[in-house]
Amino acid sequence: MRVHQIVPRLDMGDAVSHQALSIHHLLQSWGFDSRIYATGVDDFGRRYAAPDADYAAFMGKKEDILIYHYLLYCGNVEMYLRSSNRKVLVYHNITPPEFYRGFHQPLYQACALGREMLAFLVDCELALGDSEYNRRELVEAGFPEEKTGVLPINPTTGRLDGVTEDRRLLEKLSDGRVNLLFVGRLVPHKKVDDVIRLFAAYCRGVNARSRLILVGNPITSYQVALASLCKKLAVEDRVVMTGKVSDGALKAFYLASRYYISMSEHEGFCVPILEAFHFGLPVLAYAAAAVPETMGGAGVLFDRKDFPLLAELLGRLDRDEVTRRRIVEAQRRRLLDFSEEVFEERLRRLLGPLLGLEVEMDEVLAGG
Amino acid sequence: MAIFINGKEMDLHGLAARTEARIKAGLYTQSMLTLLGRDIREELRHGSTVVEAIYDLDRVLQEKGIQLEPPADLAREGERLGRWRSLYRRAKTRFIRAVNEGYVQQQERFNSFLVRGIDLAYLQLCDRVEGKETDDLTSRRDVILNPVPEWDEGTVEAFCSRAKGKVLVVMVPGLALLRLLAEKDLLALAVDLNDSLVARAQAEFLPVWRLGNPLAAVEFLDEEIGSVLVSAPEFLTASELLELARWSAERLKEGGSIYLAKRALPPSLAEGEDACARTWSPGTLRAVLESGGLTCGEERLGSREFLVGEVKG
């Protein structure tokens, strides 16, 4: 029996790629023949993944298992639909297309198609969301509740530990200003514009000695709008948009920052929040989609975007070292829920029955 | 609104009271609050389109001596037209060939090149780069901390007694002036480059913003302004001074004045490689005020001398 995994891309540092690789390594350690296929790869992914067309040779094998990672519409979904393998769907969520309206038509269409397709993927042995929020979306799309479960992402929070930070950058950023940080693609659903608004309120009203760092690749139209907003709010010289950066630079940004801000209105999981937990940055996040679940009662959550009030909150945390320390401690405790051991145990419980492994069956499915 | 810290709901009364106090003090103007609530899609109308950005990218590259090489088949109708069309064609097909870039035939590299180009083009559009790296420009402006000499008590009192209506202060000559203006309910807004000073003022709920260009602040002013004080004109460029004079001529209330301090800084701060200030002669400042449509006079307040531009009756 082989276990095949199909992902759209297998890249270094990508959360879904990391999850697929973790599953791959665990399956191998349990003695299974595990393989990964991808439509696209970088140099790192090339070492592990074969082109997804290679999977076609195994589609007819009824004893094999296919784990299909679904996070955007991709042509290889045809293989999932036609495959005779026993199928496991891992749903990483797809952004509601409305967020892209007016910004990026191809992404709008891809997201719309991807969400429409979800209902056609119901025919599987097991459907997993990487959060309870995603699992609920599966159920709403028509997946039988008893066939669903939650397999949280195992974040690569420790991956920067062995990296040497960019010292020159760190020195430059450690100039006494309070740095607010956002890491992730600069795309509309992450509401980076609201991060800028919060920063503008903070810089204008509470602490002029501040800077906002936005790390991540943008989509062009949204970036143009963000640049225009920065200019309108007269903070363009205090907002740094870095694009994609090296690991050394990313580590320097985490080390030099004082807060991590998430204003996102749609997340299936949100790995950067856990990276910020790892680096001891208090996270202030808008409570939307899977974000509260990922934070698990740690950090700061709010249910409305009152920018002057939130700026005042940042000012208070600047002065209140005790509260700040409590937040960081709670965040560190939360990280323990995402250790490699917890992930292995959970994967074993979820896939065990399909793989023929002995597992305790209590609370395996339906969010257990 | 609810805020949860480590899962526990926070009492927001204190935060809300401080926020209200800042709004009342003028740290957040109504115009700014409106902008904070506006849909980001509105910005698309104000920002450049990708096509405009590509035009600017091409222009910037040309200014920097980088020529995009037009393919032979598209250069027939004239070199320049060929270059534009070539640019569009390459953008469409995601291939760019630049003399100093070599062949760039991969989508990812094209995209990152385009994004960098758009960054550059946008900054050019914002007129912020002026041929210098942004970081360099910022650090040059930030290099002199707290350069504006503090006014003595006599000057502060003399200015406050002369001020007509609400005052916009450009470059802050000490917090004492702001405190007294605020006490007399005369302070509309102050701007300064020194973020330490601004942070101290913010802690006292004084409406001070950290801004390089005062014209960025006037966009946010809700109140009618009676006086503008530029306590260190040396920190403004000629075009910023001229625009401020024009704005004053148009928008100051009747009888309003703009005060430009004469020789506010010691010459040492306006000289040398790292200095961002410059020495303006009184004659130049007078010419700026008159070009802006103001009548110009002189006045001594306390220990300082000023050029005073008044709105023509």
Image (cartoon, rainbow, N blue to C red):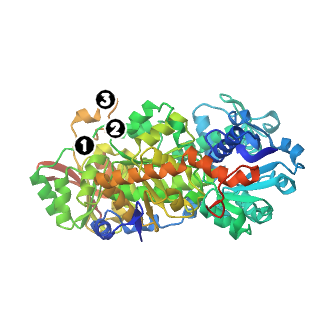
Say which of A171 and A105 sits in front.
Answer: A171
Numbered label attached to residue B272: 3
Coordinates of residue B137 in the picture (x, y in percent): 41, 38
Distance Cα–Cα, label 3 vs label 1: 17 Å
Q: Which residue is label 2 attached to?
A: B276
On the same chain, marks 1 and 2? The answer is yes
Q: Nearer the viewer, mark 3 or mark 1?
A: 1
Distance Cα–Cα, label 1 vs label 2: 13 Å
Coordinates of residue A159 in the picture (x, y in percent): 54, 38
**Amino acid of disc 3:** Gly
Numbered label attached to residue B146: 1
Determine the residue positioned at 41% across, 53% down.
A330
**Callout 1 secondary element:** loop
In the displayed structure image, the side of residue A281 where residue A217 appears, left or right: right
On the same chain, marks 2 and 3? The answer is yes
- Mark closer to the chain start, 3 or 1: 1
Coordinates of residue A164 in the picture (x, y in percent): 48, 30
Q: Nearer the viewer, mark 1 or mark 2?
A: 1
- Residue A94 visible in the shown view: no
Determine the residue positioned at 63% across, 54% down.
A151
